[in-house]
Amino acid sequence: MYIKQTIEQLAPYVPGIQPQMDGRVIKINANENPYPPSPRVKEILSEFDYGQLRYYPDATSQRLRTLIGTHFNLSSGHVFCGNGSDEIIAYLFQICLEEGDSIATPYPTYTLYKTIADIHRVHTEYVPTRDDFSIDIEALINTGAKGIFIANPNAQTGLLLPLAEIEYLLQNYEGLVVIDEAYIDFAPATASAYELVARYPNLVVLRTFSKSHSLCGIRVGFCLAAPMLVDALDKCRDSYNVSHLSQLMAAAAFEDQLYLQKTIKQVVATRERVRETLISLGFEVLPSQANFLLCKPQHHTAGEIYEFLKSKQIYVRYFDAPRLSDQLRISVGTDDEMDVLLEQLIEFLGD
Ligand SMILES: *Cc1c(COP(=O)(O)O)cnc(C)c1O
């Protein structure tokens, strides 16, 4: 069978290991939320009439778009919903980038941007972050690329790019600007770029239900953007891209802002506590504003610690990649999970 060369040569996106989850496994390698989704999601499932499944879902996820638009003080015409924000990233390539174009993105960052760019034969220009992993906006602009993708807080580092720098970028660059806010709910409320959507027609703010709403499993993401971009996304999406149950569950979770704030607060408190303990154990730990910590051990290699933790059924993330191979990325779990992690680390480092 003939497979396109672009695809045959593609380095596939590598997710964290999904181990069999028996009672002792601690999975803190994919930035999943350690707490369950809102109890309202459970109600939706238990009250759901399965006979409804013979109908196609609402093609435009209209109720969800309206809820989201209202929350962000935008019209529903500024909202697009996707089967995970990953799907929306792929659609953005379809509507804004031609074969042979370039995108610019900091390094390190979420590797999926490059994977999807490769599929669309778009070149990825990686712009190195500074020694402290901060993002160099001027260098991104100077690439002259047709689109700029920034995860904020950034993937792998957790560092937050100040809103003023995002606005500076928008004032000085006319190409597509995608601010991927997958982790923004774990940062201070003023950090989001969503208010700029009404003023900059080239801005896309990407969000997901996966991380802060604990709903990785239902695959729902959304973006906020000018109606012209939303209309273009609607033209190229799968006719029924978000399933009926996913729309219902996402809406229920989104309406429960109180529960959302409660879990975020807990994750942030645990993150800060673990960060301080890791520093006291001799790790260098970046000041993350996300639900994970990137940390560099002192007297052992990151690979050794990764293997040791794995042997104890504690799964963290190790990237054998430039600038990251001396680091471990640890997702924030429950306090109990973090206590087990820290005990094991103390034991290992003491030997
Ligand atoms: C987890 C993550 C996503 C994926 O979101 P989905 O909605 O689950 O597809 C997108 N961007 C970044 C930076 C992420 O870390």
Image: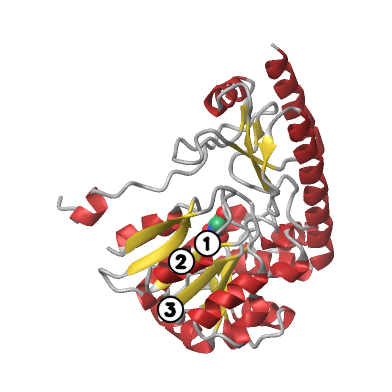
Q: Amino acid at mark 2?
A: Leu
On screen, residue 250 above or below 195: above
Q: Residues at badges 1 and 2 in contact (C-beta under 8 Å)?
A: yes
Q: Amino acid at mark 1?
A: Asp
How many discs mark residues in the rendered view? 3
Q: Is residue 136 visible?
A: yes
User: Residue 334, located in which quarter of the rendered image?
Assistant: top right
The residues tagged by marks 3 and 2 sit, at their Cα atoms, a distance apart of 11 Å
Residue name at image x 76 percent, y 45 percent: 271
User: Residue 294, located in which quarter of the rendered image?
Assistant: top right
Element class at badge 1: loop
- The x, y position of residue 257, in whole percent, is 80, 67
Q: Which residue is mark 3?
A: 175
Q: Which of 271/242 is in front? A: 271
**Within 10 angstroms of label 1, few (less than 14), some, or many (20 or more) residues?**
some
Q: Which residue is mark 2?
A: 140
